[in-house]
């Protein structure tokens, strides 16, 4: 093997290791600095920075958490994050309160 081939293989190994290290330190979604609240009508993701959120409340009947955030365009800016069941809702809620 030539020196350039070794260098090329080394670079590929380093890049692949850098990509897979994220799987080792996997964070739950509630611990991220961004709230992912689904997609809009065009299919674009709806995300809100946690630093913009001033209030959030849980609704177990609808299985949602509503995040109210500061938006200069809208006075009542909010997003709802929906859950499939109450157990997932409560798990996310607990992690959200711990990491806020």
Image: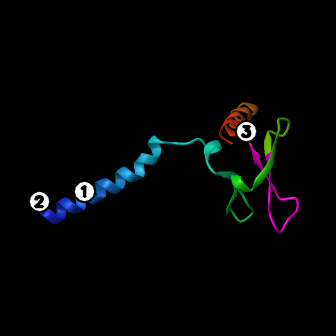
Q: Quote the CA–CA distance across marks 2 and 3.
A: 54 Å
Q: Quadrant of residue 97?
A: top right
Q: What is the spatial separation of the Cα atoms under label 2 and label 1, in whole angstroms?
A: 12 Å
Residue 1 numbered tag: 2
Quarter of the figure that contains the C terminus: top right
Q: Is residue 80 magenta?
A: yes
Q: Vertical placement of 56 versus 7: above or below?
A: above
Q: Callout 1 environment at 10 Å: few (<14), some (14 to 19), or many (20+)?
A: few
State which region is magenta.
66-85
User: SS at mark 1?
Assistant: helix
Asked if 39 appears above or below 63 in the picture, the reply is below
Residue 29, x across and y down, in percent: 62, 44
Q: Position of residue 36 (x, y in %)?
A: 67, 52
Task: Find numbered disc 3 in the image and state the secondary structure of the residue it sits on.
Answer: loop
Q: Residue at x 80, y 39 (%)?
A: 63
Residue picked out by circle 3: 84
Q: Distance between the residues labelled 3 and 1?
A: 44 Å
Viewer-side label of 2, 3:
2
Farthest-out residue, right? 75
Q: Is residue 56 left or right of residue 8?
A: right
Find numbered disc 2 in the image and state the secondary structure of the residue it sits on.
loop
Between 76 and 83, the one lying in front of the other is 76
Looking at the rendered image, the disc whose residue lies closer to the viewer, 3 or 1, is: 1
Left/right placement of residue 10 relative to residue 95 reads left
Q: Residue at x 80, y 63 (%)?
A: 71
Residue 94: x and y in percent read: 70, 33
Residue 2: give x, y in percent of width and height. 11, 63
Between residues 15 and 83, which one lies in front from this camera angle?
Answer: 15
Residue that label 1 marks: 10
């Amino acid at each position: 093997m030539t020196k350039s081939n070794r260098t090329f293989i080394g670079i590929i190994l380093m890049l692949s290791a850098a990509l897979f290290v994220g799987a080792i330190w996997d964070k739950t979604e509630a611990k991220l600095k961004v709230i992912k609240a689904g997609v809009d009508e065009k299919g674009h993701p709806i995300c809100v920075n946690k630093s913009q959120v001033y209030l959030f409340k849980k609704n177990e009947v609808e299985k949602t958490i509503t995040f109210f955030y500061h938006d200069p365009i809208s006075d009542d800016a909010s997003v709802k994050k929906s859950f499939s069941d109450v157990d997932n809702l409560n798990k996310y809620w607990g992690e959200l309160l711990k990491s806020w």
